[in-house]
Image (cartoon, rainbow, N blue to C red):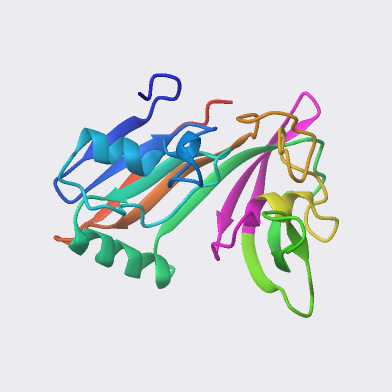
């Protein structure tokens, strides 16, 4: 059922699992039977006692990387609170489609969904909600910039908008079909490489790392 997109399990417990989502896989089911295969359904198929709606956070379909998926109601509630309080540790690696001169900084941009072109997000000083991202240039590779993103907020397409918009870094992420030059699914070079949170039962701090596939 899931042969074309493999979900990597890096940690398994009765309360939750941590997985590495491949680019091209949805986090939760979309509309229509052709979009039923996703991280949530994959986990439920592997662990049939998992709750019906296990995802406590999402990655864009074209973004790869680490996700924590709850298997119990208690774990879902406890980990969701950590996301709401912004105490979850998250870091991403991306390739920008050009050379970035600056070494590090923080991007703050107000944006919102374009109601006439969903799910595209647009800059809007008046009605947008501010997204905040810390970033650090890691190096230049064949005319492209490897960069580390540490988001403070968790807005839809936040890193992609902050990279591409002229008021942000002004350079889209390689393979971005909405804000860059991507022309097919699963081309986006954006990977959730680090995730940390408190264990929903013991409160022990857990840390996970995943090397980007690019």
Q: Against 146, is 124 above or below?
A: below
- Residue 165, given in percent of the width and then of the height, sits at 80, 55
Q: Against 164, is 131 above or below?
A: below
In this rendering, position of residue 63 left or right of residue 167? left
* Residue extending farthest top: 3
Seen at 55% across and 66% down, the residue is: 153
Seen at 19% across and 63% down, the residue is: 74
Q: Which residues are magenta?
A: 134-159
- Residue 172, given in percent of the width and then of the height, sits at 77, 43
Decide whether the magenta segment is chiefly helix, strand or loop. Answer: strand
- Residue 193, given in percent of the width and then of the height, sits at 47, 40
* Residue extending farthest front: 32
Circle count: 0
Camera-nearest residue between 32 and 19 = 32
Residue 129 sits inside the magenta stretch: no
Q: Quadrant of the N terminus?
A: top left
Residue 149 sits inside the magenta stretch: yes
Q: Which picture quadrant has residue 83?
A: bottom left
- Residue 7, given in percent of the width and then of the height, sits at 37, 30
Q: Which picture quadrant has residue 99?
A: top right
Q: Quadrant of the C terminus?
A: top right
Camera-nearest residue between 97 and 140 = 97
Seen at 53% across and 26% down, the residue is: 213
Q: Against 113, is 143 above or below?
A: above
In this rendering, position of residue 192 left or right of residue 78? right
In this rendering, position of residue 59 left or right of residue 103? left
* Residue extending farthest bottom: 126
């Amino acid at each position: 059922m899931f042969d074309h997109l493999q979900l990597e399990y890096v940690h398994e417990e009765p309360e939750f699992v941590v997985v590495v989502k491949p680019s091209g896989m949805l986090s939760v089911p979309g509309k229509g039977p052709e979009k039923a295969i996703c991280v949530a359904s994959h986990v439920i198929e592997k662990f049939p006692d998992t709750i019906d709606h296990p995802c406590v956070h999402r990655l864009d379909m074209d973004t790869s990387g680490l996700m924590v998926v709850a298997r119990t109601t208690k774990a879902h509630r406890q980990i969701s609170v950590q996301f709401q309080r912004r105490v979850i540790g998250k870091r991403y690696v991306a390739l920008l489609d050009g050379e970035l001169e600056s070494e590090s900084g923080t991007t703050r941009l107000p944006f919102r969904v374009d109601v006439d072109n969903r799910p595209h997000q647009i800059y809007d000083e008046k009605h947008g909600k501010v997204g905040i991202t810390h970033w650090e240039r890691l190096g230049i590779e064949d005319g492209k910039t490897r960069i580390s993103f540490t988001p403070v907020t968790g807005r839809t397409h936040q890193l992609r908008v902050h990279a591409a918009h002229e008021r942000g870094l002004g350079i889209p992420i390689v393979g971005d079909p909405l804000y860059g030059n991507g022309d097919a699914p699963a081309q986006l070079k954006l990977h959730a490489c680090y995730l940390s949170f408190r264990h929903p039962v013991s409160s022990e701090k857990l840390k996970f790392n995943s090397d980007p596939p690019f």
